[in-house]
Image: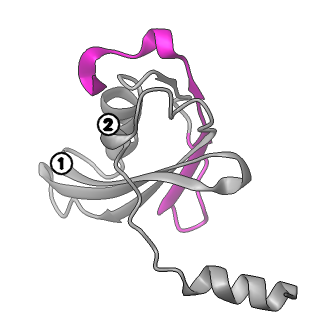
């Protein structure tokens, strides 16, 4: 079997949706290295709905979880703080407060480190 046939067979397998951060088994965060947050929409006005997608990636940039979420925001990009303080922090991740972005300021990424002793009952 050549490389083309091997690659074609992998692509023929149906894609499965990624689990949520909250559905991953204990210890599954150990290999997670990068968080990517994509700003989807909003808010159109103060206290309007803001929507984001959060994906956690392991070595080789392999996606291990995906979580779309929305909340009432006071200002644009309040979601990065929500991700850091309300989602990743309680899961045991140490997350920098600064997230580099693409030129359009719609996709943000940062390196993260999982420290199980920091995990709260939020995910258990």
Q: Quadrant of residue 52?
A: bottom left
Residue lying at the far front of the rendered structure: 1
Tell me where the magenta segment starts and ends, as one range.
99-124
Is residue 107 highlighted in magenta? yes
Q: Nearer the viewer, residue 71 or 123?
A: 123
Instruction: State if disc 2 and disc 1 touch (CB < 8 Å).
Output: yes
Instruction: Count how many numbered circles sit on residues in the image.
Output: 2
Q: Nearer the viewer, residue 67 or 14?
A: 14
- Answer few, some or many: residues within 10 Å of disc 1's Cα (few below 14, many 20 plus, some between 14 and 19): some
Q: Which residue is mark 2?
A: 82
Q: Which mark is residue 44?
A: none
Which residue is at a point 56% across and 36% down the rendered structure image?
Answer: 98
- The answer to whether residue 66 is above or below residue 81 is below
User: Of 82 and 93, which appears nearest the observer?
Assistant: 93
Residue 97 in picture, x, y percent from top left: 51, 30
The residue at the point 21 percent across, 59 percent down is: 43
Residue at the spot of label 1: 71
Comes first in the chain, label 1 or label 2: 1
Question: Which structural element holds mark 2?
Answer: helix
* Relative image position of residue 22 (x, y in whole percent): 31, 38
Circle 1 sits in a helix, a strand or a loop, which is it? strand
- Place residue 6 in its image quadrant: bottom right
| Residue 50 point in image, percent of width and height | 23, 56
């Amino acid at each position: 079997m050549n490389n083309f046939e091997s690659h074609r067979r992998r692509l023929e397998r149906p894609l499965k949706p990624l689990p949520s951060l909250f559905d991953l088994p204990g210890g599954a965060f150990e290999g997670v290295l990068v968080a990517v947050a994509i700003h989807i929409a909003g808010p159109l006005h103060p206290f309007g709905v803001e929507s984001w997608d959060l994906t956690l990636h392991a070595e080789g940039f392999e996606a291990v979880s995906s979580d779309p979420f929305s909340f009432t925001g006071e200002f644009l990009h309040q979601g990065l703080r929500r991700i850091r303080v309300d989602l990743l922090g309680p899961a045991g991740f140490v997350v920098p407060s600064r997230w580099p972005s693409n030129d359009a300021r719609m996709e943000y990424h940062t390196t993260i480190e999982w420290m199980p002793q920091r995990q709260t009952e939020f995910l258990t």
